[in-house]
Amino acid sequence: MKIQIIYLDPHDDHASARDKLNACQAQRAALVWPDRGRVLTRRLDLVLVDRHARNRGVQIGLISHDPTIRQHAVSIGIPAFDTVDDATQGSWLVKGQTPTPSKERDRTQIREILLEGRPRDRPKTARWMGVVGLGALLLLATALLPSATIVLLPEIDTQVLELDITLSPDLVPPTGIGIIAATSVSVAVQGELSRSTSTYVSVPTEYASGSVEFTNLTSEPITIPSGTGVRTTSQPTVRFETTEVASLPAGTGATTLVEIRALEAGRSGNVSTGSILAVEGLLGLDISVRNPEAISGGRETQRAAVSETDLTRLQQGLTQILLDDAEAALAADLGEGQVLVAESLVISRLINQQFDHAPGEASETVELSLHLEITGLTYMHEDLENALLLAMQGELADGIQGIPGSLEMSQDGEDTRGADGLLTLSFIASQSLYEAVDLASLAYQLQWRTPQQATSIIEEQDSLTIQEISIWPGWFPRLPLLAPRITILWDWESS
């Protein structure tokens, strides 16, 4: 029998799935579930799609590895397969179904054969009325049949797993156990920050002053200009200058006293008697100099100053502020389901750095202007969930499954970087577990049973408890005779 393969998209629902079935030209349609996304996970969705297909004379089969989808399919009477080859070569019979004769023709094909050769302009009203009438009868019969819904609560256990997840920027999904794909993101941030200085330096405030005695070495009178330089001969050299014009009388050995002042402020200008012995310039060939008394008055004061420690702490503080700003900026720009790894943020480029004072400069504050490029990693939350669930599933015994949506995770411990530069994060994941039950087979066991009998049958299985049994109409004393009219749900599926 001809089979048409129909691929579902991650965003499909029962309405779009029915639209795709409308284009089916075969008697059987195999619906292929996407690798990613949660499509038609409710049992009701499959019921609506199957009902629509049957109204068109098409039998549907499902190709999916999702255990929830497959359980729903079996409970409804829809064949489920692992691969497309299984669907095209395997049997489409489901427990409780009667094999369809191989020579049976699709209603649509029979109708086309019967109508073949009739005039094209024959009114279609009669045909449509027949189809509508038949559909109405089927809907009425279905509506009048009793139905029942049973909600089961299994015995719940908890699974906890510690797992290291490595973020790989070069990995292309799909991901596997212990490694997920990551995307590199970056942002440029800048700011300014100042802080008080923590050390002190001596700052010169007063100039040393005094007088020196000049001696004429010639027989001629000599004029000594104001600003004439004199200095000490010991190291380090201290320089002074005269503050007035002076005249030396003629004759060798003639002397005069002249006021001088140190060229630099501070205590360095304070020198002892007889320390100043040199005259600067050509005038030093004609005269000599000596300070008969000590030169004093040079003073210094202690002022706050910049230290290397101040600069280091200022840089660390502003860098952390900019890292926080970068994290906020990158987080605000994330797509749906995208997670920023704060631990991955690093300075990828120093764009500009400038201090307003250098170490040793007198200042009560020092300010830093910093411009950085920050780079980090992001991953998809769904990829992390899949990696954790895959690892947890590998630890489970046969027949034990995790309750959908029960996965919880938290990051634990510190991140590490390997020799390859990849970042590894540690997670603790937990999920609720239950023992899977063949709900389709259970529905057949409950046919035409009273609620009390159904309760006894179900509670014979130690791991199950009935949370609710509802029968429609409410006065009907038994569960339906037809198993497909009995819907069995888990507690988490009923909400």
Image: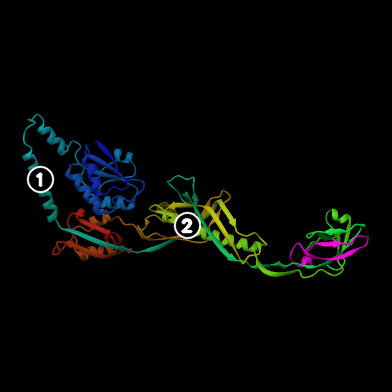
Colour scheme in the image?
rainbow
Q: Which residue is mark 1?
A: 132
Residue 411 appearing in the image: yes
In which quadrant will I find the N terminus? top left
Q: Specify the quadrant of the image occupied by residue 330.
A: bottom left
Q: Position of residue 277 (x, y in %)?
A: 87, 61
Q: Depth check: give the residue in front, 487 or 231.
A: 231
Could you say which is closer to the camera, residue 73 or residue 406?
406
The residue sitting at 36% across, 64% down in the picture is: 156
Residue drawn where x is 56% and y is 52% of the image: 352
- Helix, strand or loop under label 1: helix
Relative side of 125 to 445, left or right: left
Quarter of the image for the C terminus: give it: bottom left
What's the amino acid at mark 2? Glu
Q: Secondary structure at mark 2?
A: helix
Confirm whether residue 163 shows in the render. Answer: no
464 is higher (above) or lower (below) than 333: below
Q: Is residue 75 left or right of residue 271?
A: left
Q: Which residues are magenta?
A: 243-269
Q: Looking at the image, which residue sits at the far top?
A: 117
Q: Which mark is residue 493?
A: none
Q: Is residue 363 left or right of residue 53?
A: right
Q: CA distance from mark 2 to mark 1?
A: 62 Å
- Taking 21 as reference, is 448 above or below it? below
Residue 278 position in % (x across, y down): 86, 59
Residue 70 on image: x %, y %:
30, 50
Count of marks overlaid on the render: 2
Q: Provide the residue designation for mark 2.
A: 327
Whether residue 338 is in magenta: the answer is no
Q: Residue at x 28, y 56 (%)?
A: 439
